[in-house]
Amino acid sequence: MSKKVLILSSSPRKGGNSDTLCDEFLRGAAEAGNEVEKIFLGDKTVHYCTGCSTCSYLQKPCPQKDDAAEIIEKMVAADVIVMATPVYFYTMSAQMKTLIDRCCGRYTEMNGKEFYFIVTAAETEKNLMLRTIDTFQGFLDCLENPVVKGTVFGLGVWHKGEIQGNPAMREAYEMGLQVR
């Protein structure tokens, strides 16, 4: 049975290291027969949450006119969500955090989903990247029954293209192939 897979690439660089790993995951997941869509957040306009409580308290759509509602609708509809980020100062990109903050009104509809994480960093020590995973986990802790299926760590890469030849390329592809 194929799954609906949504890949959220939060790199500010199209074709950057984490975005390239997203493409590899996509290739594997598509080859496994899944319906896969990748959203490059840099192509979208997602404003910061203003804390107005229109979505959470009043249960009404966010009054901001941007692309967040469309992306969040796709998150709600997906079976599998891949969240990818370059690591800046040991945490996720602002693009990813901004999207997560905007999920406030609909996060209770994101139950029972499978999640994969992709992180890239100039740092080479995996244990130092766990802070970034903890930040993703903070989002998942607000959901009911999320299942973390895997994480790809693309380490020792900084400049665009350095991910080529890194073992994370194969890991991302193979992780995508495992989506069933």
Image (cartoon, rainbow, N blue to C red):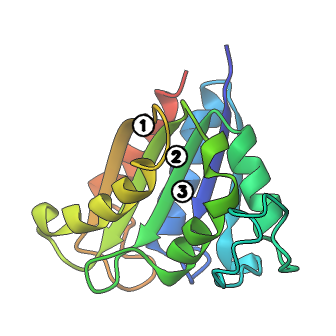
Task: Tell me the residue at 63%/80% (across/down).
Answer: 51
Q: In the rendered view, would you say 56 is above or below 86?
A: above
Q: Are marks 3 and 2 in contact (CB under 8 Å)?
A: yes
Structural distance between the alpha carbons of marks 2 and 1: 6 Å
Q: Are marks 2 and 1 in contact (CB under 8 Å)?
A: yes
Front residue of this view, candidates 117 and 100: 100
Query: Which mark, residue 52?
Result: none
Amino acid bearing label 2? Phe
Report which residue position mark 3 lands on.
22
Amino acid bearing label 1? Met
Seen in the image, is 110 located left or right of residue 36? Answer: left
Report which residue position mark 2 lands on.
25
User: How far across and how far down the image is residue 53, in percent?
Assistant: 69, 72
Structural distance between the alpha carbons of marks 1 and 3: 11 Å
Q: Is residue 128 visible?
A: yes
Amino acid bearing label 3? Cys
Q: Are marks 1 and 3 in contact (CB under 8 Å)?
A: no
User: How far across and how far down the image is residue 163, in percent?
Assistant: 37, 68
Seen in the image, is 173 located left or right of residue 106? Answer: left
Query: Which mark, residue 175?
Result: 1
Judged from this view, the residue extending furthest toward the front is 57
- Where the C terminus falls, by quadrant? top right
